[in-house]
Every structure is written in structure tokens, then in C-alpha cells.
Amino acid sequence: MLNNIQEFYNILPLIILGAAILISVVIEIYSENSEKILPWFSILAFGSVAIYSLLNIRQETVVLQNSLATGGVVNIFWFIFNIGAAIVCLLSVNYIKKYGTYFGEYYIIIQASILGMMLIAGAKDLIMIFLGLEIMSISFYVLAGFNRKRTSSNEASLKYFLLGAFATGFLVYGMALMYGKAGTTSIDIIARKISVLSSDVLFLVGVLLFLIGFSFKIAAFPFHMWVPDVYQGSPTTIAGLFSTSGKAAAFSALIVILSAVFISSGNTFFTPYLSAVAVFSMLFGSIVAIMQTDIKRMLAYSSIAHAGYMLIGLAAGNADGIAGIIFYLAAYTFMNLAAFGIVSIIEGKEETNLDIDSYAGLGSRSPVLAGLLALIMFALSGIPPFAGFFGKYYVFIAAIKADLTWLAIAGIISSVISVYFYLRVVVVMYFKSSDVEDKPVINFSELLGVVLSVILVIVLGLAPGSLIDLITSFFKI
């Protein structure tokens, strides 16, 4: 009985979010003020889950018949997902009014997507990973097309759905091969059998297909083809969710599998694959981003490059690499949410003001937004002392410790390239004049979301060691 009560407390974040989804449905059905209530109710739910996850971070357990882990690194991921979603809701309050696309299911689907992410991060079973992934993915397909009155949004949704379904096929086939050779879907049991399984060709093919499926989800080269069009066509706030919490959830699945199955046994079979994908993602994303004139497409290609940086940590295959990825994901989540948040504020009703040149003179028209965006551009480019610098620093150090110095050098080269297209935005804002004198309308909720993101970026930059120490205290590899 006591164990059942403790198990209930450990999965309370999932219960809170599940209950919030049901309550949100009732509010949407019966309340005439649901448009005003739902965003703040969602923020309250996400905030509660995030705080509870942090308060119980030391309660590491495995529940639901050994299929779901709670506490430790899992709770860190839960915090990232929920704080990110709360910020997206703050940014969305006025954004969806701007386009006249308030539909009650908007916040409900965001809640469902975060629930799926939480299941992925805590998964101790292949079936749990698949269940969480499908909940998240189906929610994302709908959210991508939420500006349903616009052709570009419908195109983004359809493209995301078709390519996502194709990638899921790789994933399911890979899981089937892993199950067929291991005789179980339990990740812990597979880890215990890894000394035998690692010499089985079919099992390794299964893991490779699993990696390919999630390479699509993290937007790594050459599985990136959906990213620019989907980010450009999706609502800007939702594109921010895709590129942050969605990417973090996909990486959490890769960490779950690779740390339990290969890193713990010292197997380096997949290091060449991960290294090659990392290099091509970094260089391709950075080089192509230079040529973009649309700021959302520029951020989309930069997202591919950042996936490459994080893959360096997986290729390193050590505890430092895993800790570096988690820190990087936390920093990148808040940096990119701030960037997409500012873009959503400046964006006009008919998808105007999305060209980088439309930011000319923003330094004089809106000093606050220009200052915040400049700070975020510095952070994304990896300039110290911001959080982006330390994210790259930790994964590069992990690569050097794993004798992959060449991979760290490739990352540094890509970072140097990225400085150009990030700082180009700053130059346009402050050193290029414009005839437009209209000032962007800044609402309280939007500014609060951006400022909260920027504060978290600064805090992580000023005290990176505190989060890294916390992560490494849990990750026993």
C-alpha cells in the first residue's frame, strides 16, 4: 500500500497534466470565456508540473511495472518541457488573436504534446517511447497547420505529417528488430544482454533504424528536409515549440537508448554514424543559413546546425557528453523561444515583417525588443559569457576526452560560420536605416515570455556549473 502511494506521488506530474487536459476540454465546452481562461490555466498547469518536478528531483524511482522512470535527469527534462510550454502559451495569447485563429483545442493540443514528451523522457520500455512519440507527433502535425486559413500553414502540416509518418516507419521497424533479437522491449533487460546482442547484426540494424527515425525528429542532416518549410509555414510560436521542447524530447529518447545500451558497455559501433551526421548537420545548417533572407528559415537552418552540435555529445559516448547535451538543450530551449517570441511580436498580420531587412532601424523604433534580440543572437552564436557558449563548450570537451578532437574542431568551424548570420541581424537592427516608423505593439504576456526566457539564458550563462553538477550527480554511466 505504501509503495502504491509513493508511486502515485512520483507520477503526479503526469497526473496533473492529464487532469489539466480533461479540465481544459470541459472549460472549452462550457465556458464562454474559455479564450481568456485556457491560456492562463495552461500556464498554471505547466508551471505546477515544472515546480513539482524540481522539488522531487531526488526521488529516483521506476514505476508502472518498470516501464517509466521518474526523478533525476527525467525530472530535469520534465522541467524543460513544461517551462518551455508555459513560455509558448504566454507568447501565444496575442499571437493567435492577431491571425484570428483562436480555436479551443490550441492549448489542449499543446498540453497533450507535452504529456507525450514526458513519457518519452521517462521511458524504460520501447513501447513507452513509441506511445509518447505518437502523442507528441500527432499533436505537432495538427499544430503545424493551425493557421488553417493560410495555404502555407496547411502545406507545412501536410509535409510534416507525410515525412513524419515515413520516419516513424523506420522507427517501428527498428524497434521490431530489437525486440525480435532481445526477446523483450524493456530497455534495462536489453542493457543487461548487450554483451551478447552487440555482436548480433540484426539487432544493430534495429538500433540503426531507431537512430534514423529519431534523426528525423531532431532535424539532423540528411533527414532535415521538412524543417525550413514547416517552420516557415507553422505559427511562429509553434515553430518555437517544435525547435525546442520537441527537439529536447527526441534527444531524451536517444539518450535513453544509447546511454543504457551502448555507452554503459563502452561500445563505439555507432560513433562513425553519429560523427558523420553531426558534421554534416553543423556545416550544412550553418552554410545554408547564411543565404536565407527570411528570419524563420534562418532559425530553421540554424536549428539543424544546433542538432549537429548536440550529436557531438552522443558521438563522444561518455558521461560528459550526455551532461553537455542536457545542458545544451536547456540553454537552446530558452534561447530559441526568446528568438521566436520576438519574431512573433514583430510579425505582421499577413506574415509580413519576416524578412531580415524588415528589422532595419528596430534599434531606434523599439530599443527593448532590439536589445533583447541582440542578446539572444549573441547567445545563439556561442559568444561568452552566455549560455550558448557553455553548451558548445561542454560537448566539445566531451569530444576531446573521447579522442574525437577533429569533431570538436569541426564544431568550432561551424560556430565561426554561424556568427555571421546571427550578427547580421544585429547589424541590420542598429546600423541599417529604414523608412518605416511603425513601432511593434508589445503586449504584457508576450514581453513576459521573452523576458523570462532571456533571464533563464543569462542565469545559465552566469552559473553553468550548478546545472552540470546537478546532471552529473544523477547520470551514472
Image (cartoon, rainbow, N blue to C red):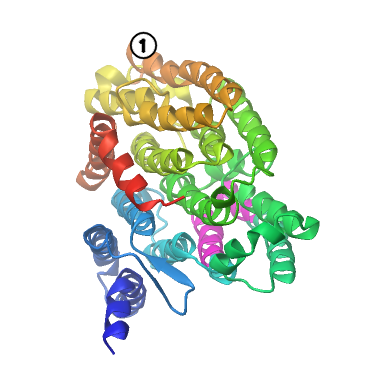
Q: Is residue 165 visible?
A: no
Q: Is residue 189 above or below residue 468?
A: below
449 falls in the magenta region = no
Residue 112's image quarter? bottom left
SS under mark 1: loop
Quarter of the picture containing the N terminus is bottom left
Q: Is residue 442 above or below residue 133?
A: above
| Residue shown at the point (39%, 58%) measured from the top left | 74
From the top left corner, tell me how far across and down residue 192 is, in percent.
58, 64
Residue found farthest to the bottom: 1
Residue found farthest to the front: 195
Report crowding for label 1: few under 14, some 14 to 19, many 20 or more residues within 10 A (C-alpha).
some
- Which amino acid type is marked by label 1? Ser
Left or right side of 389 for 176: right
157 falls in the magenta region = yes
| Residue shown at the point (58%, 61%) measured from the top left | 191
**Residue carrying label 1:** 433
Task: Please state the total of marks drawn on the protein image.
Answer: 1
Q: Is residue 212 visible?
A: yes
Residue 371's image quarter? top left
From the top left corner, tell me how far across and down residue 214 is, in percent.
61, 52
From the top left corner, tell me how far across and down residue 190 is, in percent.
61, 65
- Front residue (pair 388, 467): 467
Left or right side of 67 for 37: left
- Front residue (pair 197, 312): 197
From the top left corner, tell me how far across and down residue 114 is, in percent.
41, 61
Main secondary structure found in the magenta portion: helix
| Residue shown at the point (50%, 48%) measured from the top left | 247
Tell me where the magenta segment starts and ends, as one range. Answer: 132-160
